[in-house]
């Protein structure tokens, strides 16, 4: 579990209550992958942080924030393994991460500042079907299967 003090602080939002409610309802309705896409400086990360704080109780404080940028998939898997304390062995990493997520209950994982569609798609494909919910922020998003 990650303490909320390592998650971005709860932002003060003005004029985004409707968007925040829509996003929370979307995730409550069963969506497991959500992308916030917009121009640089448009408030995607702030909205994602506010969403995390709003849903913290639902996810039993299991909120995880990763700034992923243009990292490749192997690096992203290693980042996740380090955060979650699973094996970093290259051949056992993905099964260990899946096992961790499957037995850990609902988690909200923020993949902030996404830039590499292929790498992010590999992570989402490999960890799909677990109780984890992923929110991705990006200036552009070409991923299919992401709401």
Image (cartoon, rainbow, N blue to C red):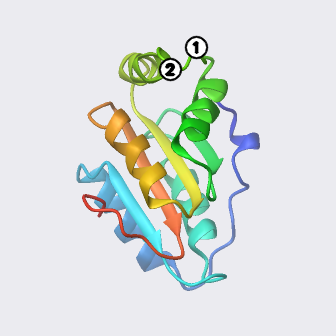
Gap in Å between the C-alphas at discs 1 and 2?
A: 6 Å
On screen, 84 above or below 27?
A: above
Quadrant where the N terminus is found in the figure: top right
Tell me residue 99's x, y (percent).
Answer: 39, 16
On screen, 103 above or below 54?
A: above
Image point (50%, 32%), residue name: 60
Give left or right: position of 40 versus 147: right
Give left or right: position of 141 versus 3: left
Image point (54%, 52%), residue name: 111
The answer to the question of whether label 1 and label 2 lie on touching residues, with beta carbons closer than 8 A, is: yes
Q: Which residue is mark 2?
A: 93
SS label for mark 1:
loop
Observer-nearest residue: 108 or 4?
108
Observer-nearest residue: 96 or 73?
73
On screen, 18 above or below 3?
A: below
Tell me residue 115's x, y (percent).
Answer: 55, 64
Q: Earlier in the sequence, mark 1 or mark 2?
A: 1
Image point (47%, 42%), residue name: 108
Does residue 100 appear anywhere in the picture?
Answer: yes
Q: Which residue is mark 1?
A: 87
Does residue 1 appear anywhere in the picture?
Answer: no
Label 2: how many Cα within 10 Å (few below 14, some 14–19, many 20+)? some
SS label for mark 2:
helix
Tell me residue 116's x, y (percent).
Answer: 52, 60
Observer-nearest residue: 54 or 141?
141
Label 1: how many Cα within 10 Å (few below 14, some 14–19, many 20+)? some
Image point (37%, 34%), residue name: 127
Q: Quadrant of residue 105?
A: top left
């Amino acid at each position: 579990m990650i303490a909320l003090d390592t998650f971005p602080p709860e932002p003060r939002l003005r004029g985004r209550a409707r968007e925040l409610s829509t996003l929370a309802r979307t995730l409550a309705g069963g969506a497991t992958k959500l992308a916030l896409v917009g121009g640089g400086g448009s408030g995607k990360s702030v909205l994602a942080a506010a969403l995390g704080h709003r849903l913290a109780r639902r996810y039993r404080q299991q909120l995880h924030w990763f700034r992923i940028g243009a990292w490749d998939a192997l690096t992203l898997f290693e980042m996740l393994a380090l955060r979650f304390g699973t094996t970093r062995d290259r051949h056992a990493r993905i099964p260990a991460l899946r096992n961790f997520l499957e037995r850990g209950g609902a988690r909200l994982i923020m993949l902030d500042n996404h830039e590499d569609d292929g790498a992010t798609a590999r992570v989402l494909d490999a960890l799909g079907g677990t109780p984890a919910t992923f929110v991705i922020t990006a200036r552009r998003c070409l991923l299919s299967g992401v709401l």
